[in-house]
Amino acid sequence: MIREYIEKLSNPILYYVDKSKNSVFRNFCLFKETGYLYKTTIPKANAGKALEYRFELDKYLKWSYFLIPVILYLIFIHTNISLGSVLFFEFLWIILANVARLICSYFYNNYLLRTFGQYEVVEFSPKLPKEKKDEFVALFRSKIIAIFIVICLFFIPAFILKYAIKLSVTSRNKFPHAIKLSNTYFAIYPKSEKIYDMRAYAKYRNRDIEGSLEDYKTVLNMSGDNFTNRDYVRFANLLYLQKKVSTPTDAIDVFNEYITKKRLSTLETSQMLWIKSIFKIENNIPEGIIQEYDDLISALDTKDTDNQFYLSADKAYILYLMGEYASALDVYNIIVSYAQSNPKKYSKQLKSILAERGFTKQRLGDTAGATMDFSMSQISPNELSKYEPAYADQEFVVEKF
């Protein structure tokens, strides 16, 4: 069946006279009822004129076959790429290509009716030797291979551009050059999340804060509800840049707007809550932080003790940073007790939370209790200060490209 269709598609003959001296013209159908039969022998001159008209229509059809995918491609590269959009544009290409073919068929049918009268629809099947059919199939196959090679050659510069952009933002620090290369890439090739990340960084280094912010918003929209490791940097920089162009409160609102679009695991949710909480503490917006931790903990399955433990540890740490030392101590007491009852599982965590509880007791004036916790943690006195809950002022995060 496939071989039969390939032979039909590869056959360039458009007219023949059968054994009964009937004239048969090839129409624009591809697989079925592909011929128009006239029960008479049409003079060569008249048949030649019909074929000349057909050649003219074929020229328009070939141009449409070239222009339709080009135009659709240029539209496609400026849309959010997904499986759905790919399928949509493929479907649209098939529809438009068939519409062009139907238009050519309409004009050709009318020409034949005006010139030779009514025809009979048949299969277009000129008698050809096997060698000729094989020759046509081989030529058709070579055209397909040539088209595939041209497409591959078209996309080779994309990899060169990507590498050039990467060099510009990493080893060479030529940020205006990286922005120009990125713009060239987006004018020719489909959207790339990595290119947006690199251009966002280049724009930031080029002091285009708003442009960098827009690139991060674009790439977060591109990925839809998917959450990847790169999104940690994107959301951190989203907060930082939005604060630069407006206010910390606006930054939180924008952060919440984009994070609600993502499908997150419990671990990812806790990590994003941590980023947002540190940002709110740094910018003196403590309202709602602890409530979000409480809501997340209460939403956990009662059997999910691991996430309950780690989220409670984060909550205690945040309470310390907020200066709520008594509340922090209450939480530390619970998680220290739980970790001590599961020493094999939480031995590493126990070391740090004992030190953190010690600093909490120290803040509350319980020097003896703090000394005992520091001793139980078995942390060297020279290293102990590293375990006090603290945060660094937020800066633009540069990821590895």
Image: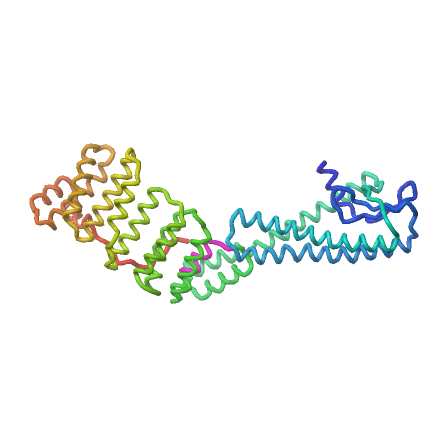
Q: Position of residue 133 (x, y in %)?
A: 79, 41
Horizontally, residue 374 falls left or right of residue 69, namely left
Please indicate, yes or no, whether residue 40 appears anywhere in the rendered image: yes
The stretch in magenta equals 191-201
212 falls in the magenta region: no
**Residue at the image position 18 percent from the left and 48 percent from the top:** 383
Answer with left or right where residue 163 lies relative to residue 106: left
Query: What x and y, as percent, mark residue 74?
Result: 58, 58
Check residue 199 for magenta coloring: yes
Q: How is the image coloured?
A: rainbow
Quadrant position of the N terminus in the picture: top right
Q: Is residue 147 left or right of residue 85?
A: right
Viewer-proximal residue among 122 and 11: 122
Q: How many marks?
A: 0
Residue at x 72%, y 55% (from the top left corner): 62
Q: Quadrant of residue 253?
A: bottom left
Residue 359: in sight, yes or no? no
Identify which residue, 175 or 191, lies in the foreground: 191
- Judged left or right of residue 346, residue 163 is right
Q: Main secondary structure of the magenta part?
A: helix
- For the view shown, which residue lies furthest in the left direction? 368
The percent position of residue 185, horizontal first and vertical second, equals 52, 59
Q: Residue at x 58, y 49 (%)?
A: 88
Q: Residue 123's spot in the image, x, y percent?
A: 81, 41
Query: At 39% from the left edge and 51% from the top edge, which residue is drawn?
Result: 231
